[in-house]
Image (cartoon, helix red, strand yellow):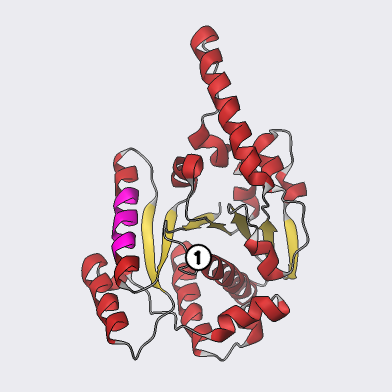
Amino acid sequence: MAAIYAVMNRKGGVGKTTTAVTLAHGLALRLRKETGTGYVLIVDLDPQGHVAKALGVKHNGQLADVLLDPKQDIREAVVPTHREGLFVLPSSDRLADAKIDLLSRHLAEVIDYRRRRRRRVTLDEILSTRLAPANEAFDYIIVDCPPSLDMLEDAVYRYADAAIVPVKPDYLGTAGTVQHTTDILEAQTDGFDIRIEVIVPTFFRSREVLANQMYGELRDMFGKQKVADPIPQAAVLEQAPATRQQTIFEYAPGHPAARAYGKLVNRIYGNGR
């Protein structure tokens, strides 16, 4: 069964998609190096569809079809990335319309259930149900979450094994991360199994006093073992997808940012095997 990680933070601009794409590619590379096989899937829950754009993948926003149609075969919706072992379940602005449709169907099913007592698939089960066939086909599933999950928040909490939380180590970013992780802990109390796997400081400027102070506060709040080595702020992280639709491991594998992400890959690989 796949190890499923949700890359999530309610604050935007913290490097969620970069982290999700880089981590997924790194895991695919590591699997192939260590075992000669293995598969990784990125599920893009953001209607902007940035995962496919970053990797240069052409698609039709297939995630919307998978969520709306129980008969849609997820194997036909998953798209290869031309990188060995790495696949994407892509999103588009069609997902926004799909979520409205799902909510309407949910309300209709609630009414039908009350009248006829029929079993219904609840909204918090939608990902676990529709994406279930992927769990046996892939070694890792990385879910790239938008800042606002709205109606899919509980669905992500139910589907994912653990949360990876990128955070920009400034005052507002740190405060927002505390609130977000508190929400995850409350979800655990409500019966969801999701745990906080790791906090990932991003856009880190090692020479700035405030960045180091916030990094220290994160380690104090969550514990040194829960906070990953910082990902340095680097133009190459933006240049790689923008100019060549590549990850940092392809574009500049010797760069300090690539080494930092490599440590995160090793950490997740060690926990998921």
For the point 29% across and 52% down, which residue is it? 182
The image quadrant of residue 33 is bottom right
Label 1 crowding class (10 Å Cα cut-off): few <14, some 14-19, many 20+?
many
10 with respect to 217 (left or right): right
Question: Horizontal placement of 173 versus 232: left or right?
Answer: left
Query: In the figure, residue 217 lies in which quadrant?
Result: bottom left
| Residue designated by label 1 | 16
Q: Residue pushed farthest left?
A: 220
Left-right relation of 48 to 152: right
Q: Amino acid at mark 1?
A: Lys
Foreground pick, 137 / 102: 102
Report x, y in % for residue 271: 43, 65
Question: Mainly helix, strand or loop, the magenta region?
Answer: helix
Magenta region includes residue 185: no
Residue 246 appears in view = no
Q: Find the residue positioned furthest to the front.
A: 172
Q: Which residues are magenta?
A: 175-184
For mark 1, give the secondary structure. helix
Residue 135 locus on image (x, y percent)? 59, 49
Q: Nearer the viewer, residue 231 or 138?
A: 231
Q: Which corner quadrant of the image does residue 197 belong to?
A: bottom left
Residue 163 position, x and y percent, is 42, 57
